[in-house]
Image (cartoon, helix red, strand yellow):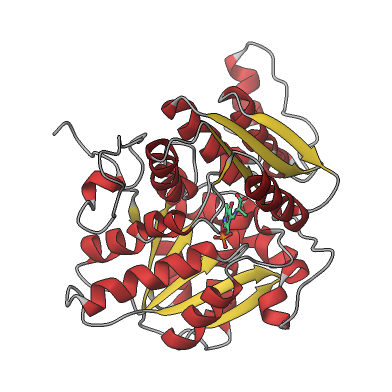
């Protein structure tokens, strides 16, 4: 076979499909598990990054979407709909385009990063901005899919989470074991649910001898699971995880409790610090929502909740290019220099 075939074929024994389904893939999965020397040194642990920005649309959503769109096509649907803080919409519209399906995406007005909007437009989705937050969009998408002939491809569609389990399987396949701790950002809570199920599958089948403790991190202004109640008006710079009432709430609580893990809040300041540090120190540019896992890693290492000497995997969920506005925030002007080597040298203080 020519290279990596995408997650459905790579894990075909573990991903059930309808009879005769045509697999809709863009080659998702097989993302790098990258050693993180700076973070390892700083935390006294062995830290790896699972770099999900390497997926075809730049986020982990592609793992679930290849399965969801393969099912939608096989069951005869002609159109799909999703609510999204941006990445699900980018992914759904790409896989729908590949399958020849129509896609519609409901996004919270003014609260989706520019790159994600550009993707949905490029892939030909009908993009509808809703006067509300993600939770309003999801309720609306559910109602529409219930009442009209259009398939819902949010993670409340159970086949999405089957696809997202593949990230945990890949981590174990590459490490040759399960990590001690797995850190990830939590928004609608599908991903932490899926990772935990994936780790459990491998342990139950005897492929690994243990499971990691799951460490999930919400943004402080959008931390319903930490608070134990929905947040009516979630706010955070990390728009990807600006969710006040996660659909997979129970799955996230199960992942936390069954694994002996935790779900905690990180402030926007902590998220931004991690967001700036990761490209500078590790050469890995991620979006703000993804930096929540790094902010949580640093916070739990600093206060001792993360035991030194652990093998830790942090999922960084989406590519930094998704959100150019946040990356450029605070930059007044790119320094202009004449076409002249001595001017370049003096601008660079080279003497
Ligand atoms: N990181 C990124 C970059 C995301 O886009 C999301 C979710 C998460 C983390 C959280 O994952 O929802 O499974 O807990 N984005 C959704 C979307 C809500 O619409 O794209 P989760």
* 215 up-or-down from 150: above or below: below
* 260 up-or-down from 1: above or below: below
Q: Is residue 351 visible?
A: no
What residue appears at the point 39 percent right and 47 percent down from the top-left corner? Answer: 67
Task: Using the rendered view, name the quadrant where residue 293 is placed.
Answer: bottom right
Image quadrant holding the N terminus, namely: top left
Q: Position of residue 195 (x, y in %)?
A: 41, 67
Residue found farthest to the left: 1
Task: Using the rendered view, name the quadrant where residue 135 is placed.
Answer: bottom right
* 186 up-or-down from 28: above or below: below
Q: Is residue 307 left or right of residue 279?
A: left
Image quadrant holding the C terminus, namely: top right
Q: Is residue 97 left or right of residue 110?
A: left
Q: Is residue 331 visible?
A: yes
Q: Is residue 9 left or right of residue 85?
A: left
Q: How many marks?
A: 0
Q: Is residue 65 left or right of residue 30?
A: right
What residue appears at the point 75 percent right and 79 percent down from the top-left corner? Answer: 229
Residue sitting nearer the eye, 155 or 345? 155
Residue sitting nearer the eye, 175 or 310? 175
Residue found farthest to the top: 339
Residue sitting nearer the eye, 6 or 71? 71
What residue appears at the point 61 percent right and 41 percent down from the top-left corner? Answer: 81
Question: In which quadrant of this rendering is ligand 1 seen?
Answer: bottom right
Q: Position of residue 192 (x, y in %)?
A: 49, 68
Q: Position of residue 244 (x, y in %)?
A: 74, 66
């Amino acid at each position: 076979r020519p290279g990596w075939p995408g997650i459905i074929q790579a894990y075909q024994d573990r991903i059930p499909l309808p009879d005769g389904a045509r697999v809709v893939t863009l080659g998702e999965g097989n993302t790098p598990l990258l050693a993180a020397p700076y973070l390892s040194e700083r935390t006294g642990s062995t830290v790896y990054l699972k770099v999900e920005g390497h997926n075809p649309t730049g986020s982990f959503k592609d793992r679930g979407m290849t399965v969801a769109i393969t099912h939608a096509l096989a069951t005869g649907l002609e159109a799909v709909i999703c609510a999204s803080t941006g990445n699900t919409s980018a992914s759904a519209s790409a896989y729908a385009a590949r399958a020849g399906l129509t896609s519609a995406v409901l996004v919270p007005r003014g609260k989706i990063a520019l790159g994600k909007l550009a993707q949905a437009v490029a892939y030909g989705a009908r993009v509808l901005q809703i006067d509300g937050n993600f939770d309003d969009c999801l309720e609306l998408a559910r109602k529409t899919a219930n009442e009209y002939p259009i398939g819902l491809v949010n993670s409340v569609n159970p086949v999405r989470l089957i696809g997202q389990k593949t990230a945990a399987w890949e981590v174990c396949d590459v490490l040759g074991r399960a990590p001690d701790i797995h850190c990830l950002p939590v928004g609608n809570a599908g991903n932490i649910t899926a990772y935990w199920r994936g780790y459990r599958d491998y342990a139950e089948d005897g492929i690994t001898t243990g499971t990691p403790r799951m460490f999930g991190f919400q943004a402080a202004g959008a931390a319903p699971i930490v608070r134990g109640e929905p947040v009516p008006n979630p706010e955070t710079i990390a728009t990807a995880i600006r969710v006040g009432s996660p659909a997979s709430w129970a799955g996230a609580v199960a992942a936390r409790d069954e694994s002996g893990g935790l779900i905690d809040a990180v402030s926007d300041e902590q998220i931004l610090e991690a967001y700036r540090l990761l490209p500078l120190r590790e050469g890995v540019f991620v979006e703000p929502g993804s930096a929540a896992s790094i902010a949580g890693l640093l916070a739990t290492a600093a206060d001792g909740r993360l035991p030194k000497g652990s093998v830790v995997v942090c999922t960084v969920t989406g590519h930094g290019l998704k959100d150019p506005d946040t990356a450029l925030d605070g930059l007044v002007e790119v320094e202009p220099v004449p076409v002249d080597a001595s001017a370049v040298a003096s601008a660079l203080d080279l003497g």
